[in-house]
Image (spheres, rainbow, N blue to C red):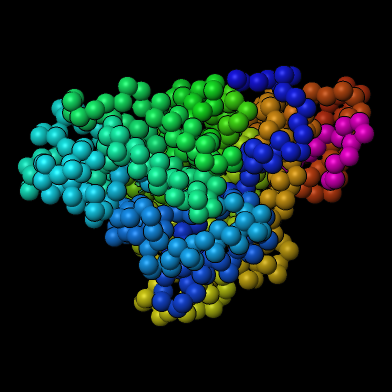
Amino acid sequence: MVQSASTVLRMRITDTSDLWWKTAVVYCLDVETYLDWNGDGTGDFEGLSHRIDYLAELGITCLWLMPFYPTPNRDDGYDISDYYGVDPRLGHLGDFVEVVRTARDRGIRVIVDLVVNHTSDQHPWFKASRSSRDSAYRDWYVWRDEPPEHPEATAFPGEETSTWQFDEKTGQYYLHNFYHFQPDLNVTNPLVRDEVAKVMGFWLQLGVTGFRVDAVPFFLDTEGVEPGHGQLKNPLEYLKSLHAFLERRSGEAIMLGEVNLARSKQLSYFGGEDADGLTMQFDFIGMQNLFLSLARQDARPLAAALAKRPVLPQANQWANFVRNHDELTLDKLTPKQRDEVFAAFAPDADEQIYGRGIIRRLGPMLLGDPRRIRMVYSLLFSMPGTPVLFYGQEIGMGEDLARGDREAVRTPMQWTHDANGGFSDAPASKLAAPMVSGGYSPEHVNVASQRHDQDSLLHFIRRLVERYRASAEIGWGDFTLLDQPNNSVLAHTMSGDEGRMLAVHNFSAEPAVVTVALYAPDTRFVDLLRDGSVTTDTRGRLDLSLEGYGYRWLRQVGPNEKRLF
Ligand code: GLC
């Protein structure tokens, strides 16, 4: 049931910990590029276990591990050849469990990538499937004599031409929504569905608290499956059965779905009003409009995108992000809007990909302007939802354009100013990925120096994490956009039983004064990101001044206020 604020029981502190994801801080990393402990040039689980304290210091509460399973590694591990193991380059299952245990000890839950739309073509299931039309595994994948008349477009234009690949040996085509070496599993086959549940059960048993579910709409899509090879009446029902399975196995596990679809389709992926589908979804539309707002120095596109979010049942949540490990996709903008964002942040062809995305990180896109970068992160942590960081964002890492495509943002973590940025002792030529060079190289951007600098981005992000975690109304409260006259300013409140917060963000380089008039006279608001407070005038108005790219978080001080500021 959707509950309005008035019908929700007064929130108890235990509610926030039971539905922990509503106020989590998620951090995504790839073990391969985080810290190399054995000196072979590739990051490993042992290295990661030595950085759990760093993550705890940052204050994150949920670690999302990108794929670490055995893989030919042709799509950064999203091409899996064994769902029940750890790629030997990264360690073994024992090392994995050490990481999960250590993280848990520091109050950090671990979620892992569940990539079950497809396997690698090197997976034994696919090798068996393609060996003969009579193989017991034939129906684990989607085979046809001819591609459908109107096949879906490929996810990687320029790299793939079709989503159907002809296989000489058995003379049929198989479906691959992504690369041709990633054949799609056939979820209409009950054996495949059983195996997906088994994979989930396996990792839950090893201590994970859920999954980032890869490519959900593709995974559920059964188009292309020939009649007679089984159909799912309603693929979303399958999602519900996975939810039920998860609930039976764990009281706290989540599914955080990669669903880049229109607003009108999102609620059904959450399971509708019953909230028995995905627990969380990334807000791709919010993210894309955030960049349009930045490009225009106008808050209205973001405001409109947030206003159009479907209202979610209480158990569900949005995952906010400004950048992930893929291209910064702009596919939900109009061509004209997309061109505006390209012109502002990625004017050169080598900064763009697939005609729809950008392969740069935030810092370089914003020309390293600390005011603007901080304003964006302030927004990330104060928009309704749960913030997700991609490793290296906390120190403002840049990208490696020379590497090209999505790999550009997957360079090794920069720990120190030493050789290889302290990532590895191996010769540079042996690294899993080259270090960033130039102005964003480890010499200029690294954890060690920022840890000692109270004014660094790292300290700023830590402060945001701390304030966010102490402000349950951001994750739980009702969201309201405030009317005010500056188009460049986003002003919003989050309010619920936990309290009421007001946040203002200025997308323009020009200072602004924001007048909001929603409150009773003499109501006090405390600044949460700096010293100070403001009180409404006799007409209940507040005048808030903002510098160029300025931001403020304010909490209304209620009667008998007991919270710490
Ligand atoms: C998702 C991942 C991406 C991967 C693709 C195929 O979109 O985020 O990195 O290439 O799925 O698995």
Tell me which residue sits at (90%, 24%) in the image: 521
Residue 106: image quadrant is bottom right
Tell me which residue sits at (80%, 49%) in the image: 530
Q: Which residues are magenta?
A: 550-565
Magenta-drawn stretch contains 335: no
- Image quarter in which the N terminus is found: top right
Residue 99 picture location, percent across and down: 55, 62
Tell me which residue sits at (46%, 77%) in the image: 38
Closest to the observer, 459 or 268: 268
Tell me which residue sits at (52%, 70%) in the image: 47
Closest to the observer, 471 or 406: 471
**Location of residue 441 with respect to 541 vertically, above or below:** below
Closest to the observer, 479 or 30: 30
Residue 166 picture location, percent across and down: 12, 43
Magenta-drawn stretch contains 564: yes
Predominant secondary structure, magenta span: loop
Residue 142: image quadrant is top left
